[in-house]
Every structure is written in C-alpha cells, then in structure tokens.
Image (cartoon, rainbow, N blue to C red):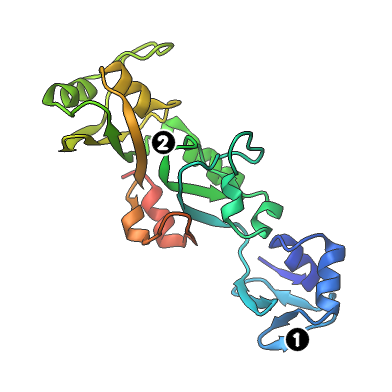
C-alpha cells in the first residue's frame, strides 16, 4: 500500500468514476479522521485508512474477500438470465470493483458463497488441485438409507466422468436429510451423485468451506460480511 490522492482512493474502492468521486469530494460528502475533505488531490496513506462517505464509514481494502449466505433463487453470475444476481445483495460499489463469486451455487442452492475482486484468490479457491472440502446438507425426496450413504462413500458413476466420484464423508441426519463432504467441485455434483444413487435432491445448502462455517459467521440468509485474515486462513487445506 502507498499514498494516494483521495479521488483515486474512492475510485479504487468502487465508489464510481474519477469524475464522480471528485464531485463527491467537492460536495463535502467525504471525511477522513472526522475532517471533511473537499480537495480531491489530498493524499493519504492507504494502510489502515478509514474514511466516511455519505455518513457511512469504510476501511480501505486493497482487495475484498466476502462471505455471503446465499438465499434461493439468486444466480451466481454477473449477467443473470432468469433470476436476480447475487451481486444485487451487496452494496453497489462491489460491482464497480468487479467482485465475482468464487465458483458457483445453483440458483436454488443456498448457503456459504465466497466473493472477491482478487483474481489470484478466485483462481486458487476454484482450483480442483487444492482439495478444499466443502460440506453440504441435502434434503432428499426418498428416505435416506444406510445403503445410500454407503453408495456415496464408495463412489457413484456420473455421466461424462471417467471414474466414479465418492464423498469424503457422508452421514444421515434424519429420514430425509444427509450431510455430505466433497472435494472435487464438479458441476451439480451433489444433485447428480444423489440421482446416480437412486434418490433425488429436493433442497441443498452449503454450510462449510474448508474450516470456515456458516454457523461461525452468524449470517442470516441474504447477509454478507468481510472476511479477515484469520477467517481466510480457515480456507487453506490442512
């Protein structure tokens, strides 16, 4: 991090074009350290910088790392086609920052979704080589049986996959709910594995990525939070 002019700082944080940011500053909408700044050329060290815009305080972040508790009927796409995009659940400046979902959840799948504007982070978290476990809770149409659990643990053959895919762990929660941990992250994997095992997925929620849990974050559906360094460390495989 380094010293930057205030208009560049606001632009980098997603508050609009340089021209718009300069207008906000000139209109007295921006304060640093409790002092309203009207000169867009004023320079500030970005490390540890907090500023207020429209009476809301923001910390400067070179990159943002976000956890969202995704509700149903939102698409993990910047150009959604049939449902609203998950970016509509975040403040508008994240769109300007080019924040993107890390991987995808189906529009009807709920739960923990990571988002960021850090391309290296997105690539690393999306890579199948990392073997980051992801925990899902699935509601099934037919009752959960011991045979179903054993099939998922032993591996089921999916169409267009060269070899059977197996769950890292799997356990029955109740008659129609199953908890399953996967590492591969294939397209519609939980739903397809359940179908291949002779059942059908009625509802699906992702509750954990690595050791980062939705319960630990305390997010209600539709809520989001910044992830700090200690939470990001939970995403690194053991």
**How many other residues sit within 10 Å of disc 2, few (<14), some (14-19) or many (≥20)?**
few
Q: What label sits on residue 130 in the rendered view?
A: 2
- Helix, strand or loop status at disc 2: helix
**Labels 2, 1: front one:** 1
Instruction: Work out whether residue 224 or residue 99 is closer to the camera in this orientation and state it.
Output: 224
Picture quarter with the C terminus: top left
Decide if residue 116 is in sight here: yes
Q: Residue at x 54, y 49 (%)?
A: 115
Residue 209 visible to an observer of this rendering: no
The residue wearing badge 1 is 36
- Is 35 situated above or below 125? below
Q: Which quarter of the figure is the N terminus placed in? A: bottom right
Vertical placement of 219 versus 206: above or below?
below
Rendered image quadrant of residue 205: top left
Occupied quadrant, residue 162: top left
* Residue drawn at x 66%, y 80% as measured from the top left: 55
**Residue 100: horizontal and vertical position, in percent?**
60, 45
Q: Quadrant of residue 28?
A: bottom right
Residue with the most extreme left position: 146
Q: Kindly identify the residue that appears in the image at 57 percent across and 50 percent down.
A: 116
127 or 175: which is nearer to us?
A: 175
Element type at marker 1?
Answer: strand
Q: Is residue 40 left or right of residue 139?
A: right
Residue 181: image location, x then y, percent: 28, 36
Q: Is residue 218 left or right of residue 155?
A: right
Task: State the residue at coordinates (76%, 62%).
Answer: 11
Q: CA distance from mark 2 to mark 1?
A: 46 Å
**Rendered view: 18 above or below 67:** below
- Near mark 1 (Cα within 10 A), the count class, few <14, some 14-19 or many ≥20, is some
x and y percent of residue 105 in the render? 47, 37
């Amino acid at each position: 991090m380094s010293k930057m002019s205030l208009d560049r700082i606001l632009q980098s944080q997603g508050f609009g074009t340089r021209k718009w940011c300069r207008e906000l500053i000139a209109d007295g909408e921006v304060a640093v350290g409790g002092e309203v700044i009207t000169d867009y050329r004023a320079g500030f060290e970005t490390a540890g910088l907090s500023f207020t815009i429209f009476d809301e305080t923001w910390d400067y972040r070179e990159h943002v790392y976000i956890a969202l508790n995704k509700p149903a009927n939102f698409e993990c796409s910047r150009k959604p086609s049939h449902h609203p995009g998950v970016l509509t659940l975040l403040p508008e400046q994240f769109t300007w920052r080019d924040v993107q979902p890390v991987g995808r959840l189906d529009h009807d799948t709920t739960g923990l979704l990571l988002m960021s504007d850090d391309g290296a982070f997105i690539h690393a978290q999306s890579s199948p080589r990392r073997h980051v476990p992801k925990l899902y809770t699935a509601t099934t149409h037919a009752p959960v049986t011991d045979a179903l659990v054993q099939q998922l643990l032993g591996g089921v053959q999916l169409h267009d996959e060269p070899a059977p895919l197996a769950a890292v762990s799997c356990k029955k929660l109740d008659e129609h709910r199953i908890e399953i941990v996967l590492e591969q992250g294939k397209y519609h994997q939980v739903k397809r594995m359940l179908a291949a095992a002779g059942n059908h997925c009625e509802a699906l929620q992702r509750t954990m990525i690595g050791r980062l849990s939705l319960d630990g974050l305390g997010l209600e559906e539709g809520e989001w939070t910044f992830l700090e360094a200690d939470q990001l460390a939970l995403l690194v495989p053991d």
